[in-house]
Image (cartoon, rainbow, N blue to C red):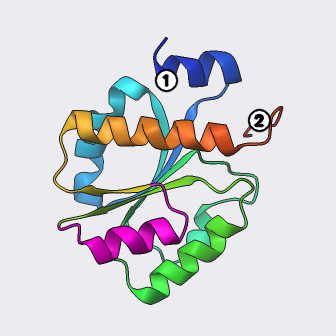
Amino acid sequence: MAVREALVNAQGTELRMLAVVPADRRAEIGRQLAPLKPDPLFLDRIGGVGVAIREEDAFQVALLPASLSDTDWWELWGVLALMNPRPAILVYTREATFRLWSGVLELGCYDVIVDPFSDETLRGAVLGAAKSYEERRPSGSQPE
């Protein structure tokens, strides 16, 4: 059984995803992820993220750009840190340096992926992150 099928069938959940991507990339990212049948919330900027994400929202995966300003990272991190459990965080960048990769992992994020990414790379990273989220989630709890 594929990881996506296991997430939906065994847990009764959808693949809920927060994706911070520019508006002009939403269609491309949506197409790349379509086989996973995600339920994404796309944001193109961080300002007001606390309003866009409701307290009861649950996301298995958050896809975030490494290029966010420090202020945007802190604002977003503040919102994500209140989620229990916090989504598995995938950071995307044009160039993955050891410093970036180690910093991302040190913060407890799932992984770094290099953009532009192939369909298979993006889907594999999202599925791996979703699986990591499911493994961290307390047994018996369901995302809403």
Give the x, y percent position of residue 30. Answer: 32, 39
Give the x, y percent position of residue 14. Answer: 59, 30
Give the x, y percent position of residue 77. Answer: 58, 73
The residue tagged with tag 1: helix, strand or loop? Answer: helix
Kindly identify the residue that appears in the image at 58 percent across and 25 percent down: 7
Q: In the image, which disc is placed on residue 3?
A: 1
Kindly identify the residue that appears in the image at 31 percent across and 77 percent down: 99
Q: In the image, which disc is placed on residue 142?
A: 2
Q: Is residue 67 visible?
A: no
The residue tagged with tag 2: helix, strand or loop? Answer: loop
The magenta stretch spans residue 123: no
Q: CA distance from mark 1 to mark 2?
A: 17 Å
For this orientation, the residue located farthest to the bottom is: 71
Indicate left or right for 95 with 74 as reference: left
Kindly identify the residue that appears in the image at 69 percent across and 59 percent down: 54
- In the image, residue 51 above or below residue 88: below
Indicate left or right for 31 with 44 as reference: left
Crowding around mark 1 (Cα neighbors within 10 Å: few <14, some 14 to 19, many 20+) is some
Q: Give whichever of 39, 104 is nearer the camera.
A: 104
Q: Give whichever of 100, 92 is nearer the camera.
A: 100
Residue type marked 1: Val
Crowding around mark 2 (Cα neighbors within 10 Å: few <14, some 14 to 19, many 20+) is few
Q: Quadrant of residue 42?
A: bottom left
Residue type marked 2: Gln
Sequence-earlier tag: 1 or 2: 1
Q: Quadrant of residue 125?
A: top left
- Residues in magenta, as a range: 95-110
